Image (cartoon, rainbow, N blue to C red):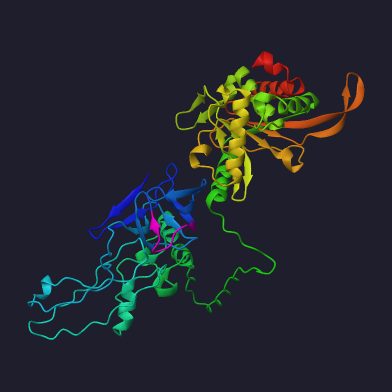
Amino acid sequence: MTTMTENASGLREFKMPDVGEGLTEAEILKWYVQPGDTVTDGQVVCEVETAKAAVELPIPYNGVVHELRFPEGTTVDVGTSIIAVNVGGGAVAPAADAPAQEAPVQETPAEEAKPQGRTPVLVGYGVAESSTKRRPRKGAEVPAQKPEPEAPAGTYYAASAIQAEMNGHSAPAASRPLAKPPVRKLAKDLGVDLATVTPSGPDGIITREDVHAAVAPPAPQPTVVETPAAPAPAPAPVSTYDGARETRVPVKGVRKMTAQAMVGSAFTAPHVTEFVTIDVTRTMKLVEELRQDKEMQGLRVNPLLLIAKALLVAIKRNPDVNASWDEANQEIVLKHYVNLGIAAATPRGLIVPNIKDAHDKTLPQLAQALGELVSTAREGKTSPAAMQGGTVTITNVGVFGVDTGTPILNPGESAILAVGAIKLQPWVHKGKVKPRQVTTLALSFDHRLVDGELGSKVLADVAAILEQPKRLITWA
């Protein structure tokens, strides 16, 4: 969704779009342009991070960058202007914040006088008109106004504050409290009216601490009795930490979304996990053979490819496992398609993009889709759409040398398969102990819609295929 506005001077405001489904905010990670740069339609001007992914934003028109509304690292609400572009080709008209030179005019009654000044504001939050200012009487000499100094590029404050200092008085107070977008959202979530909050930040800006202080319950008043007043309780110690020995990392973006989703899943869906340890020596041999196959040249061929194919075959044989629980309608929703999720660890946290309609893909097509999914995830370019609509997931914890685990379901899914490390171990094969390639699989499922029998059948089918991969031919 592209959002923009244009004023009469040819200055267009590009607003933060909703780059996902229902997202309310995004953090500006990096600006690729600066004021004065020429931009063209479709050119990427910045990268933002939502609660789901990092996304590059293209500008939808040609022009010259007039102003960046927010610096890097700022979290901005969807619908807020983030960059102004001059598309008129000429000089941009003076901003409303800068007062224009006045010429002698006829005397106007006070009640018809119009406000000329504006109060300093945080960009993107509008302004409130100040008290009225009388025009000079007819014939009166108009004092020359001092030219307002041009603010350097990248400056993020209102020009009226500079003009107020030059005139020897402070700018009039804004009728709307000053607060950054995250603070406004926090106040909204906590039901706090910012007009009632006492600001403690620089220039009268309301901080998160101010909002929390506004909702803190008042200290209980001691009951007055005919006894000596009790001494006031000692103030609670202030929480501190040693910066040399500790590092605080803000939880936001993808990591915050993942944490919320995992907590919601763990305490909503009753998890059951089953395990099986299997001999995958034949599967490892098939992987080597496929790497030499002409049809698979240039494609990503590894054990995960055959594990994914085995799971898709198991779902085909046991379709009821591919479902979700509709709490609102108290229904089980059976899916006639498989969007296969692959958990990927990235610098921004764990993400689970999925291969759309994986059930319809041939082995070469599945290999190509897996390769593209992994490469995109490593580059941090996975789109929000790629992480939506998954039905079943695979998480390969074996790449970290881990034998197995008890994976947590992705919200809206009924099953997730964890694959452990493949190791050479002693194994009884044809009546003799031999070194074989062995791994452990773990299947977690939602016990509301997948009972023990169904979950066991799915896991047993995956294990049987990986032990005897020729079954792919007969079962697929």
Residue 366 is covered by the magenta coloring: no
Q: Position of residue 45 (x, y in %)?
A: 44, 54
Which of 244 and 261 lies nearest the eye of the viewer? 244
Give the percent coordinates (x, y) of residue 41: 37, 49
Q: In this view, does 375 lie to the left or right of 50?
A: right
Residue depicted at x 65% and y 69%: 243
- Residue in view at x 24 percent, y 60 percent: 9
The N terminus, quarter of image: top left
- Give the magenta range: 30-39
Front residue of 70/212: it is 70
Q: In this view, does 241 lie above or below 318?
A: below
Is residue 446 visible from the viewing direction of this image?
no
Q: Could you tell me which residue is drawn at 49 percent across and 42 percent down? A: 384
Asked if residue 135 lies left or right of residue 428, the reply is left
Residue 90 appears in the rendering: yes
In the rendered view, would you say 165 is above or below 46?
below
